[in-house]
Amino acid sequence: MFFKLTDEQLMIQSMVREFSRKVVAPTAAERDQTKEFPAENFKKMGELGLMGMMVPVEYGGEGTDTVSYVLALSEIAYSCASTAVVMSVHNSIVCESIRRYGNEEQKQKFLPSMTSAEIIGAFALTEPHAGSDPVSQLTTAVRDGDYYVLNGTKRFITSGKNGGLVIVTAKTDEAKRHKGISAFIVERDTPGLIVGHTEDKMGLRASDTTDLIFEDCRVSAENLLGKEGDGFKIAMTALDGGRIGISAQSVGVAQAALDAAVKYAKGRDQFGKKISKFQGLRWIVADMATEIEAARQLMFSAAAMKDRGEKYTLQASIAKLFASEMVNRVTGKALQMHGGYGFTKDYPVERFYRDARVFTIYEGTSEIQRVVISNQIFKDKRKP
Ligand code: CAA
């Protein structure tokens, strides 16, 4: 599908591009070293409307479409993938789930402080022994009067430490398998919610990834998201949107890697001429550009299907699978084009390479995307 962006979408893209390159990019390498969470940048992003892009205006959001959102997210990822993943989980998963499944009180209570970035959202589905198979999770939520009492451990939670609110899934009825899982909105200061181990990761180092431990954590029944038993559906729907977000992160990082490689090739002399003059390298650049453009179109088409209210599970997984594998190929080639310098911290390309590595893993591995894609194809009744 060839995509023609509207004037408004182009305006958002250019506004975020300017912000990203002026404010986010200059400190990205330093953040990668210090692992400092860019809290101030998120406040500025809140002011610019980037932390509640698809939230309706009446709850403090911008009410933009998903196409505008992926444009903005890929511009942030271009400069700093750590900042982008926090923005992605916050917008695509947490704000979207509250917007879609929250009742009026929950939307009024939580969304305005999220859109201003006063509160960053986290999403807790994964557990130490339940990654690709979230139905096997062990966290429980037992009703006790006006409360649910949560017990269990969640793992690999983006913004587990710096988040102010987490959507957590837990079993309310063991016997019902996925239909016995419910989702809760839990605020950071809730007694019994403990931030556990923080991971020391190879990439996305300025975004904290932690365990969250629930120890007799009493959560008001008012914070049940949707109905009891809706938790798995809420998580799967959230991940459909999240996967479009990962395709946008992939496109942003890949474009940054391509631009860095082209700049390097234009400046580097070997054998008496710029290495950009060698056909061997030019063909690599052509392949990189082609793959990025293909991923961009898949990202747009998934986002546009969501905006049109169509079912987009298949398209989101296709976009995520292709884009996340593409960015791993592209950052590898960009690093190779830098020769020995690519392996040093003097150039940003080694950070792009490390940051992109997790894109084929989180929010559903490439193998899980293939399960989703093939399941969708085989159950399509329109197919012969
Ligand atoms: N939308 C709505 N409902 C869905 C759905 C979707 N996309 N996918 C499945 N469902 C529903 C099904 O309709 C079914 O419901 P019914 O019984 O009512 O029909 C139910 O969910 C169960 O479906 P399946 O039998 O297909 O479920 P399954 O147990 O076989 O699992 C799976 C399917 C695709 C493998 C799924 O478990 C999955 O996506 N796993 C990967 C999980 C994942 O992505 N984890 C990443 C965690 S988030 C993260 O990375 C953290 C971060 O902070 C970045």
Image (tube, rainbow, N blue to C red):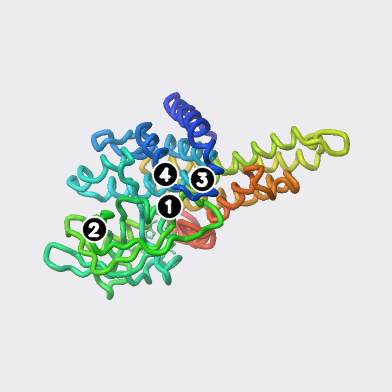
The percent position of residue 111, horizontal first and vertical second, equals 26, 43
Q: Is mark 1 within 8 Å of ligand 1?
A: yes
Type of amino acid at the residue the image marks with label 3: Arg
| Mark closest to the chain's N terminus, 1 or 3 | 3
Q: CA distance from mark 3 to mark 4?
A: 16 Å
In three-dimensional space, the C-alpha distance between marks 2 and 1, rounded to whole angstroms, equals 34 Å
Badge nearest the viewer, 2 or 1: 2
Q: 321 or 219: nearer the eye? A: 219
- Evaluate whether residue 75 shows in this view: yes
**Residue at mark 3:** 31
Give me the C-alpha separation between circle 4 and circle 2: 23 Å
Q: Answer yes or no: disc 4 within 8 Å of ligand 1.
A: no
Q: Which mark is in front, 3 or 4?
A: 3
| Residue lying at 84% horizontally and 38% vertically, measured from the top left | 270
> Where is residue 125 drawn, in percent x and y?
37, 61
Q: Secondary structure at mark 1?
A: helix
User: Taking the image as drawn, is residue 237 in sight?
Assistant: no
Q: Residue furthest top?
A: 7
Q: Quadrant of ligand 1?
A: bottom left
Nearer-N-terminus badge (2/3):
3
Identify the residue under disc 2: 190
Asked if labels 1 and 2 touch by Cβ distance under 8 angstroms, the answer is no
Dot 3 falls on a residue whose secondary structure is helix
